[in-house]
Image (cartoon, helix red, strand yellow):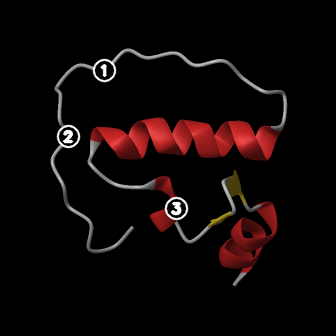
Amino acid sequence: MVGFQNQASADLWDRAWPATGDPETDAFESLSQIYGLFGLAASQNPYTTHGRADTEKLRAGVQG
C-alpha cells in the first residue's frame, strides 16, 4: 500500500490463529494480524470488503 510506512512494533513475530475454512475470511484474518504489527487496520487494504478478502477486487486489480 503506497504511502503507509509504519515501523513494525516488534522485530520478531510468531503468531498462530485458527482457520475458519473460508479462504476469504482466513485471508482477511491473516491481513489483520500482519497489519496490526504495523499499527494498521486490514480494512485499509483496497482488496477487502466487510471483513473478507475480496477476490473479485483482487482479480480486477491484477488484470487492470
Circle 2 packing at 10 Å, graded few (<14), some (14-19), many (20+), is some
Q: Amino acid at mark 2?
A: Ala
Query: Mark 1 — residue?
Result: 13
Q: Which mark is residue 8?
A: 2
User: Residue drawn 66% across and 42% down?
Assistant: 27
Tag 2–tag 1 contact (CB < 8 Å):
yes
The 10 Å Cα crowd at callout 1, few under 14, some 14 to 19, many 20 or more, is few
Give the residue at x 69% y 84%.
64
Report the residue marked by disc 3. Answer: 43
**Which label sits in the foreground, 2 or 3?**
3
Q: Is residue 18 left or right of residue 39?
A: right
Residue type at the position of mark 3? Ser
Viewer-nearest of labels 1 and 3?
3
Circle nearer the N terminus (2, 3): 2
Vertical order, 10 against 15 (above or below):
below
Q: Residue 13: x, y in percent?
A: 30, 20
Q: Position of residue 16 (x, y in %)?
A: 52, 15
